[in-house]
Image (spheres, rainbow, N blue to C red):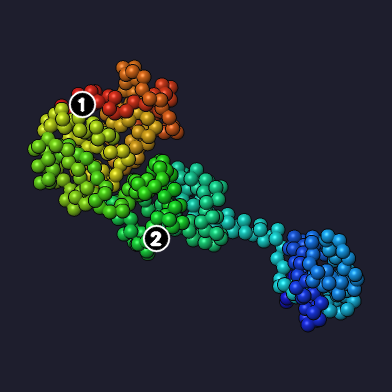
Amino acid sequence: MTPGTAPTVDDVRLRRLLGAPGLSWLVDRARRRLERGQPLTGPVSLRAPSSDQRMAAERLLGRAPGGGRSLSVRLEAVDDLLRRSGISPAGLTAAVVALTGPVTLLGPARAEEERAWAQAYAPLDALADEFPALGPWTERLRGDGLVRRLAGTPTAAADLLGQVATVVRALPAEPAMSLPAFASRLLGSAHALDDGTPLCTLTLSGVRALTGLPDTGGVQGRREAWTSVGLLRDELSSTVLALNLRGTPALDWMADAGEPAVLTLRQLTRQPPRSAPPTVRICENPAVLAAAADTYGTGCAPLVCLQGQPSAAALVLLSHLHAHGSRFRYHGDFDWGGLRIAGALLRRVPWTPWRYTAADYRTAVCNLPSGPPLTGVRAEAPWDPDLPDALQEAGVRVEEEAVLGDLLSDLG
């Protein structure tokens, strides 16, 4: 019932009769029953009533309050009193609406709220339709309650998830750019993706779903996640290692000395190499590049080291070299993390395996003493679909350092 449809009540007399503080519990119980769609019949009880509450019930019904541990009032008696007195000719239901306002049935209201929540996820559903690989992530967000906790209401959630979809759809950023500049251009605020905001939290989870990066937590983990899609906190913290690349005065000087160069994103975006070798080998771990410099110096084949996940600097360098004709041969650790790094790189630039196939892994396992056990969640290897099965069968990790001799034999 609403005020517009409720029968006329004598408001002054009604408030004098049922509006006393000592009867608020009675009105509240009656309202709760209406909200649940239950009839206003039978008793309602109050445990350990105060003397004021007992006296209010006595005045209402004209009876002795009694001395038990609880106070009970039959709703039919109150309804009959209101009708007979003319205070509320339609009885207790109309009186409760007049005193407390419109009553909304909780069942339909909750169903409507759930429909609104379901609709709020529409931006993510559309995103998953465009990028099926994101389907498990969108389902996880729908089921784990994180969006509800961060947004609070379906309306706020729809707006938040719309922004998340807008950001994820624009990734990876090419060329790489600063995170504040990206946020300003796409969302109208340089601080929209600041740490701790609901948008940052949900978008980072989407970035990890997009790239396969594990959630390592902390500032460094967030930095690596943003960097993996070309978004940078700054131009200097993102670096890549290179040996015997040429094309800038700094690179030429380091190549003439046979020493590794540490290239920042700032250097690569402002002054990229002017030349590109026909073939560049890529490794995952700095130990390989350091050993190559020690072993061959100026005679080493051009080599780039990712230092783990492909940084924005590494992606900018390799994209530039690829655009100018370089072909890439890649090697990484034989474990699930290594396969994910290799897959992330393959999604950005093409490469062929450098001793990084199922056959190479089986050979390494046979030739090496028992290595550390393989742990973690399985990853796929698009360049060699047999490789994950080989890892799972042997159950052994083979790090690059363990096959360093073989890798060095290809670099001299």
The answer to whether 382 appears left or right of 251 in the picture is right
The answer to whether 401 appears left or right of 272 in the picture is right
The structure residue drawn at horizontal position 45% and vertical position 52%, both measured from the top left corner, is 202
Q: Is residue 62 above or below residue 387?
A: below
Q: Is residue 96 visible?
A: no
The structure residue drawn at horizontal position 41% and vertical position 33%, both measured from the top left corner, is 379
The structure residue drawn at horizontal position 25% and vertical position 25%, both measured from the top left corner, is 404
Q: Is residue 187 above or below residue 233?
A: below
Label 1: how many residues lie within 10 Å, few (<14), some (14-19) or many (20+)? some
- Please give the residue where the numbered disc 2 appears in the rendered image: 192
| Depth order, front residue of 346/241 | 241
Q: Secondary structure at mark 1?
A: helix
Residue 355 occupies quadrant = top left
- Give the x, y percent position of residue 360: 31, 23
Question: CA separation, marks 2 and 1?
Answer: 46 Å
The answer to whether 383 appears left or right of 156 in the picture is left
**Amino acid beneath label 2:** Ala
- Give the x, y percent position of residue 168: 41, 52
- Please give the residue where the numbered disc 1 appears in the rendered image: 408
Which label belongs to residue 292? none
| Depth order, front residue of 345/292 | 292
- Give the x, y percent position of residue 403: 27, 24
Q: Secondary structure at mark 2?
A: loop
